């Protein structure tokens, strides 16, 4: 099941469906109606998918399906929806035993999932080097290498003592067999923070300026600001027991600088008038910085600008 079948979720769902798996897409609004009526189109440099899909609303899922009907739930919801969605489906989720794999932005989703269904059923994960958006209802366009990193939550070492632990290796094998570039991590929380280096460094600035990733990283002034924001993020990671340093910042900046020009998800959300994942990106960094008693002035600035931009957009 793909829970939150937007651009990223539909790409990975299409890969799994083409590999012969029965995939259920949970969506809403015009996108859901289009998938139900005409099917799903996913366009990617290495994937052209056009076909009918099993798509339903979250309400219909609760009415017509049981959690034990599913082998794996892949969560690609916006992080802003995680708390409410888990609350709405908590009783339904507890009636099954399947694992939940988060492929969401931020570092706070897995703890919420573990609190709802238990650590044994929680798989940490992240989608990297992919941009995917709903171009129009029922039509998704994706770009990039589209890798997935997955791991036991919060790390392989910490999870070893948890009884009933999901067989991670078999899920990795299934994803690879579906032509998904999936890789295992022994320390998925560290990988989530390394991705946050990029997301906090670029997404808010992209939304504020309207620029894509290539335009930002190739401009010397923006590049210096991005590196400084990444450094603030690396410091904040220590609040979660994750040790990141200058080498991680340099590696992640070099990685994003080598990407094709990608419009960030936060910029797309802003353009479409959707709620922004501020609390999960800059908000998460600022919360940890306060916990540590350290300053993160550039993150604080872009956070304040972005929140003000959201107020203006809402007509405040």
Image (cartoon, rainbow, N blue to C red):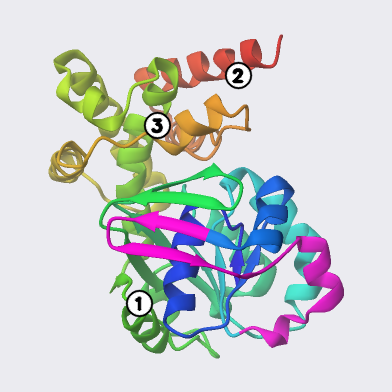
- Residues under numbered marks 2 and 3 in contact, where contact means CB atoms less than 8 Å apart: no
Depth check, front residue: 209 or 302: 209
Question: Would you place residue 68 above or below residue 268 in this image?
Answer: below
Identify the disc placed on residue 310.
2
Q: How far from the left and from the top, in percent, is residue 83? A: 69, 52
Give percent across and percent down for residue 125: 42, 64
Residue 203 disc label: 3
For label 2, the crowd category at 10 Å Cα-Cα, with few meaning under 14, some 14 to 19 and many 20 or more, is some
Q: Nearer the viewer, mark 3 or mark 1?
A: 3
* Helix, strand or loop under label 1: helix
Assess disc 3: are there few (<14), some (14-19) or many (≥20) residues with their C-alpha within 10 Å of its C-alpha.
many
Badge nearest the viewer, 2 or 1: 2
**Residue 121: quarter of image:** bottom right
In space, the residues marked 2 and 1 are separated at their CA atoms by 41 Å
Instruction: Check disc 2 and report its element: helix, strand or loop.
Output: helix
Residue 171 seen anywhere in this rendered image of the structure: yes
Q: Residue furthest right?
A: 63
Nearer the observer, 18 or 258: 18
- Picture disc at residue 20: none
**Circle 1 residue:** 157
Q: Could you tell which of marks 3 and 1 lies nearer the N-terminus?
A: 1
Residue at 58% x, 47% y is: 78
| Magenta stretch encompasses residue 169 | no
Q: Is residue 103 left or right of residue 66?
A: left
Whether tag 3 and tag 1 are in contact, CB under 8 A, the answer is no
Report which quarter residue 292 is drawn in: top left
Of the 4 image quadrants, the one containing the C terminus is: top right
């Amino acid at each position: 099941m793909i829970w939150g079948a937007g651009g990223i979720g539909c790409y990975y769902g299409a890969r799994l469906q083409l590999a012969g798996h029965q995939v259920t897409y949970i969506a809403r609004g015009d996108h859901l109606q289009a998938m139900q009526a005409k099917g799903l189109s996913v366009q990617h440099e290495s994937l052209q998918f056009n076909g009918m899909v099993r798509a339903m609303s979250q309400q219909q899922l609760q009415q017509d399906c049981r959690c034990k009907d599913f082998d794996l739930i892949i969560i690609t919801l916006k992080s802003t929806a995680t708390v409410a969605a888990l609350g709405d489906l908590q009783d339904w989720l507890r009636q099954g035993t399947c694992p939940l794999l988060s492929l969401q932005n931020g570092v706070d989703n897995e703890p919420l999932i573990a609190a709802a269904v238990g650590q044994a059923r929680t798989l940490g994960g992240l989608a990297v080097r992919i941009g995917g958006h709903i171009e129009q209802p029922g039509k998704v366009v994706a770009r990039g290498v589209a890798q997935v990193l997955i791991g036991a939550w919060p790390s392989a070492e910490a999870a070893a003592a948890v009884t009933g632990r999901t067989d991670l290796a078999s899920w990795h094998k299934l994803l690879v067999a579906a032509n998904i570039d999936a890789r295992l991590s022994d320390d998925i929380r560290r990988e989530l923070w390394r991705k946050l280096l990029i997301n906090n460094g670029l997404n808010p600035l992209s939304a504020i300026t309207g620029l894509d990733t290539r335009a930002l990283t190739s401009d010397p002034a923006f590049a210096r600001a991005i590196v400084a924001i990444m450094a603030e993020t690396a410091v904040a990671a220590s609040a979660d027991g994750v040790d990141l340093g200058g080498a991680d910042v340099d590696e992640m900046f070099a990685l994003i600088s080598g990407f094709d020009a990608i419009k960030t998800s936060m910029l797309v959300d802003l353009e479409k008038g959707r709620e922004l994942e501020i609390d999960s990106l800059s908000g998460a960094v600022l919360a940890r910085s306060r916990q540590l008693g350290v300053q993160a002035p550039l993150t604080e600035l872009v956070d304040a600008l972005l929140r003000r931009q959201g107020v203006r957009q809402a007509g405040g």
